[in-house]
Image (spheres, grey):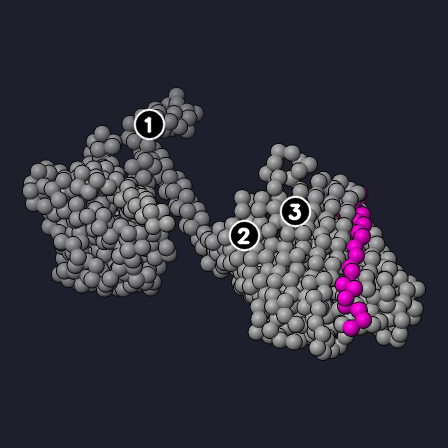
Amino acid sequence: MKTKIIATLLLGTLVGIEAATAQPSEGDVDVLLQRLRELEQRVKILERNGELDQEVAMEQAKTIPTVSVGADGLVVRSADTNFVFALHGLLQVDSRTFFDDGGIAGNNGFLLRRARPIFSGTVFHDFDFNFTPDFGGTTVQIFDAYLNYRYQPWLQARIGKFKTPIGLEYLQPDPVAAFNERALPSGLVPGRDIGFQIWGDINGGVLSYAAGIFNGLGDRRNSGNVDFDDSKEFAGRLFTQLFKKSEVDGLRGLGFGVGGSWGDYSSASATGLPAGYVTDGQQQFFAYNATTTTDGEHWRVAPQGYYYVGPFSLLGEYTISAQNVRQAAQTVLLRNTGWQVAVGWVLTGEEATFNGVTPRNAFDPRHGKWGAFQIVGRYSELDIDNDAFPIYADPTAAKAAQVWTVGLNWYPNKNLTVKTSYAYTTFDGGGTGTTPLAAVTRQPEQVFFTRAQLTF
Amino acid sequence: MKTIWSLLWLGIALSVSAKDAKLLNVSYDPTRELYQDYNVAFAKYWKEKTGVTVKIEQSHGGSGKQARAVIDGLEADVVTLALAYDIDAVAQRARLLAPGWQKRLPQNSSPYTSTIVFLVRKGNPKGIKDWADLVKPGIRIIPANPKTSGAARWTYLAAWGYALKQNGGDETKARAFVQQFYKNAPVLDTGARGATTTFVQRGIGDVLVGWENEAILSMKESGRDEFELIVPSISILAEPPVAVVDKNVKRHGTADVAQAYLEYLYTSEGQEIVAKHHFRPRNSATTSQFTAQFTKLELFTVDDVFGGWQKAHKTHFADGGFYDQIQQANR
């Protein structure tokens, strides 16, 4: 009826000019009505086909993988999100300038500290993987190569090569470490080892745990991808952010825990000993005698904690690495200890976290935006067990080192970081003789670092 | 210690016996209302018989799409789809049930049937009486898309079968007929329910060509004032099959209840529910109760005319098959 009225009106309008002489007949109205209905059908068909095309497009979109390129790298994700392949990268170009170093040659200069393409992802929703070689330094190494099964966030299993769960600062991802180099206690824990680990974050990370079995490594060593003896090392860590879900801002960033390991090396091997302990400037200040070897038990304990609130950060840890060593017929259990306290303050007000600082505004001087700035300071010590001297340690090595470090970090954006720091290291003992150890420990080490870092 | 173990086992045993059963029925579009009613009846029956409370979940969509979902991991305990071909796909591609699944239940595992009929607007303004009227110029027909819909495949084969019979088995003429048929289809929805919506709610087209149960349901819902059911002289006997998904029920521990769920469809209670939802029952006693609802017509089967679903699919619906060729020619 509505259509008929419109048709009549329309026809009336069209012929209205001649209305005085001609009136539309019933037949004319019916013809026009029919045409209108036809037109209406065509419009409806077009609309419906448009909807169906949209439905088809939406269905197709569900099967098309998404590719995203951004601050988090290149990520290809299947439409059902069960498969993810990501390419990330880390590049650190450093400089080290030593002052009053007694003329040690070859320690000043630019270097590629880390150059890592990172290939990571997920297959079948629950299986994550990571493959990270490193082209920095003097040798190409595989740093991370592992598979991770995620049953739930609180129950995961990892197998492959990855960081042994002991030291707090060592477990902090490389790109977000607050200083150019890690502190002395990180030298008392193993690096990346090959093994199997059960781990998880319970209640959203209020309690985190990790427990695993590994090939076992000397302090500060990375696995050469094969075991050096038949025995294995057990390592684990418990860490709680007890107030993570608290309403109180000032408590949420508090975390503390303890890591540790135990192993009993079956062979007398120098590989099971530390590769040597180094300063912030990565110069060796302690080494065992070349003929000193492992002799059984090696355990570590590392109580640790941090506190992050607003722009403020505080991180501390104490580490004991106790190892039975042998020199000819003599053996001894040596307890080397280290500790550190590091503080930081983000001058531009951004929040400091264990996972780094994200600038509120990316660097854009045209619009008066400068990124984020953070000042950091740290004191750390490492003490060698007195029983190491004079039999087991290199007699020209230092018995202890103490380092003061201050730094300024600039975060132009999420991907770039520029770091500068100055470290002043003093030594107890050492300094006598002509060995490289003596050359390093003869005077305090004063080194100025810079770093330009790209991560994505 | 022994006492503690005994108590523990007792607790486990009690918790198992008290556990409710749960089933997922993955079905096609137009069975939504049927299974809503049927599930209530079966749950009551199962509770009375076994004391176990069974909760049945339903999933509906285009038959082919639902089969793909099960293949991709949707944990169906039973599938009640529009075509045997779709359940074959679940059996062959995902190996979730044995190839001989169709012989496990009576009547080729099809507890109900349906056919393809026409729904026209009140007064049948275009004078549509049989298949031949659908290919006349100016007629707009609304079938679903055979590439995505089970109902649409039955429709396609019904039209083809009619044309074959009219032309003494001449395949070329049958193909020309079906080509004209789809030339008159301005909209091809992805499923039977979508086609019904297009015709009934959107007011598009002169005739809906699809499931008999959908047509009767549409008439009922519209109060019989807007549409008329037209039963053609001949159509296809659609036999929507049902099957237990063996591997899933084994994993879920629901084999017994799933089997009983499908067997109950063949009982007089099940058949009555089937008929109330306008599917043709298999049981002759129930059929006689609903004689008025189902017009008698000549019916042919896929096996008789097309040599079975596998052959029909390969010839007509596979990529590059007759349907694709027809659509290409119609562009």
How far apart are the two marked residues, 1 and 2, measured between alpha carbons? 72 Å
User: What is the magenta range?
Assistant: A366-391
Residue drawn at the location 62% of the way across and 44% of the way down: A241
Q: Does the magenta-highlighted stretch encompass residue A58? A: no
Look at the image and tell me whether residue A275 can be seen.
Answer: yes
> Are circles 1 and 2 on residues that touch, CB within 8 Å?
no
How many other residues sit within 10 Å of disc 3, few (<14), some (14-19) or many (≥20)? Answer: some
Look at the image and tell me whether residue A77 can be seen.
Answer: no
Residue drawn at the location 69% of the way across and 47% of the way down: A306
Q: Amino acid at mark 3?
A: Phe
- Tell me: residue B105, above or below residue A251: below
Residue A454 appears left or right of B101: right
Residue behind mark 2: A200
**Mark 1 element type:** helix
How far apart are the two marked residues, 1 and 3, measured between alpha carbons? 81 Å
User: Where does residue B294 sit, x and y in percent of width and height?
Assistant: 13, 41
- Tell me: residue A200, above or below residue A330: above
> Disc 1 or 2, which lies upstream in sequence?
1
Chain under numbered label 3 = A
User: Which residue, as the protein is rendered here, is positioned at the far top?
Assistant: A20
Residue A440 appears left or right of A169: right
Residue behind mark 3: A256
Residue behind mark 1: A4
Tell if the residue under mark 2 belongs to the same chain as the one under mark 3: yes
